[in-house]
Amino acid sequence: MKLNIILSGKSDLLQPLTCTRKIFGCPVGTSTLGAEIGKRLSRILKQQSEGANDGRVLSALEDFWPSEGLIEDICGVKKDVVVYYGDKKEIVMWIGKGQEVPEGAEWIQADSKSLLIRAPWHLLSINEDIIGSIGRTVINGEVRDGVTIDGEIIVGRGTVILPGVYIEGNVVFGENCKIGPNCYFRGSTLVGNKCHVGQSVEVKNSILMDKVSAGHLSYIGDSIIGSG
């Protein structure tokens, strides 16, 4: 089964956030938006290719985020599918024998956890979706004694989490970061590579891109901080 990504022409609404960064390159979860969308769509590709629908084409808008529930619904359908979003029934994904929207297909409405990415804060929702579902802790860096972890974390190589840091919920730390001491992380937070989060900083449900420096005694909440 082939994958056909459709350029919707609306991703430039994120331009104030991304600058020259393409939307697919924005960090979310454990990698980038493009990679995470690819992971979800790959489940449909695998399921359909193993069944009677082998040889069909999966088409999707580049800035559509399908929920896990929607993916399950699509995988359970054995014929052509059209997925629409919102009251205006905007077509965001379909499966057919060609790249055109198929006629006579089964129509499925995208659920409330699926998103058309039209605003920066949609990346926070996607980040929360991915990081919130992390099921195990993976530590490739160093977590010093005196760190409290109430959730699951991923720690990249070269990253050091200093004593007194309290982590509530799931958090992903990139590579070569220095975290703490005495910081408070909560919600589903992503810290990129080569970041420095100083003493007694609180970070809630946010995305810190690469090379972000958060000075001591500061607060970052429900925010996206650009690279550097």
Image (cartoon, rainbow, N blue to C red):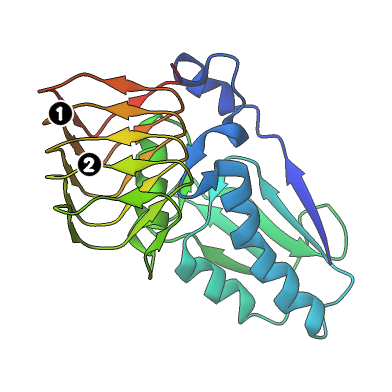
Residue type, numbered disc 1: Gln
Judge the density around disc 2: few (<14), some (14-19), many (≥20) Cα neighbours within 10 Å: some
Q: Are marks 1 and 2 in contact (CB under 8 Å)?
A: no
Residue, x 22% and y 41% (percent of image)? Answer: 162
Residue, x 73% and y 41% (percent of image)? Answer: 6
Residue, x 50% and y 37% (percent of image)? Answer: 27
Mark 1 vs mark 2: give the one in front: 2
* Residue 188 image point, x, y percent: 29, 49
* Residue 224 image point, x, y percent: 34, 28
Residue, x 21% and y 26% (percent of image)? Answer: 198
* Residue 131 image point, x, y percent: 38, 55
Query: According to the image, label 1 marks what residue?
Result: 199
Q: Nearer the viewer, residue 118 or 222?
A: 222
Callout 1 secondary element: loop
Residue 113 in sight: no
Residue type, numbered disc 2: Leu
Query: According to the image, label 2 marks what residue?
Result: 162
228 horizontally vs 185: left or right: right
Residue 131's place in the image compared with 133, above or below, is above
